[in-house]
Image (spheres, rainbow, N blue to C red):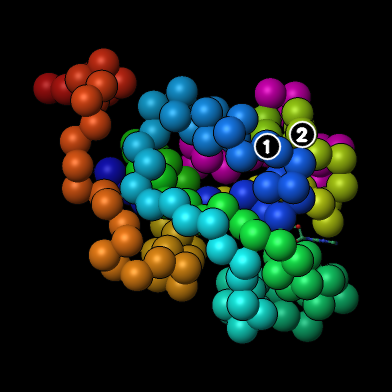
Amino acid sequence: MGLTFIAIKPDGVHRGLVGEIIARFEKRGLKLCALKVVVPEKAIAEKHYEEHAGKPFYPGLVDYLCSGPIVAMVWSGKDVVAVTRKMIGATKPAQSEPGTIRGDLALDMGRNVIHGSDSDDSAQREIKLWFKEEEVCSKYVKADRMWVYEVT
Ligand code: IDP
């Protein structure tokens, strides 16, 4: 099963959306492998968003991520990157479908509540950036596994 890195951004924490967002991933059947509340250091935020370095919105984006605590998480499951990206919705909330996290809970691209890795390679890079190896518990078997997956 794959892994992905998910972060509830500072606006999501301040707005009290942590429980609502985690509940959506749990109800979908995904497995929580790591979770911590952290105020990002600037260097880590810069690294996290390094693909956007040089773009006009980059400094504001880094300041936004560092502006308060985030909830950093690792989730696991079948097709977890694709599934969580769909659940998160489009980057621009106006284009996020209702039923997605951003489509239900956000209005502004610069305050779009949540981050999710966009590929398996990004997920690996981001998990390594935010977590030590021993902080990620991906080996346990979730008790509902046989009811979430068709086990052959
Ligand atoms: P994603 O978060 O949907 O993967 P990315 O294109 O990777 O979207 O952009 C990362 C984050 O940067 C977005 O979630 C959003 O908060 C911010 N962002 C992206 N493009 C813009 C922009 O044009 N103006 C302001 N913020 C932006």
Q: Where is residue 71 in the image (x, y as percent from the top left)?
A: 56, 53
**Which residue is depicted at the point 44% across and 51% down?**
35
Q: Position of residue 84 (x, y in %)?
A: 52, 40
Q: In which quarter of the image is residue 42?
A: bottom right
Q: Horizontally, is 151 left or right of 22 in the view? A: left
Q: Is residue 4 above or below residue 19?
A: below
**Which residue is depicted at the point 62% across and 57% down?**
70
Image quarter where the N terminus lies is top left
First in sequence, mark 1 or 2: give its number.
Answer: 1
Q: Horizontally, is 101 left or right of 2 in the view? A: right
The amino acid type, in three-letter code, at marker 2 is Leu
User: Is label 1 in a helix, a strand or a loop?
Assistant: loop
Residue lying at the far left in this picture: please name it: 152
The amino acid type, in three-letter code, at marker 1 is Leu
Most foreground residue, 12 or 24: 12
Q: Residues within 10 Å of mark 2 (few under 14, many from 20)?
A: some
Image quarter where the C terminus lies is top left
> Can residue 84 be seen at all in this image of the molecule?
yes
> Can residue 117 be seen at all in this image of the molecule?
no
* Quadrant of the picture in which ligand 1 is shown: bottom right
- CB atoms at circles 1 and 2 under 8 Å apart? yes
Which range of residues does the magenta coloring cover? 82-99
Most foreground residue, 63 or 82: 63
Give the label on residue 17, or none: 1
- Residue where numbered disc 2 is placed: 105
Q: Horizontally, is 76 left or right of 126 in the view? A: left
**Which residue is depicted at the point 38% across and 41% down?**
32
Q: Position of residue 44 (x, y in %)?
A: 58, 77
Q: Is residue 91 magenta?
A: yes
Tag count: 2
Q: Residues within 10 Å of mark 1 (few under 14, many from 20)?
A: some
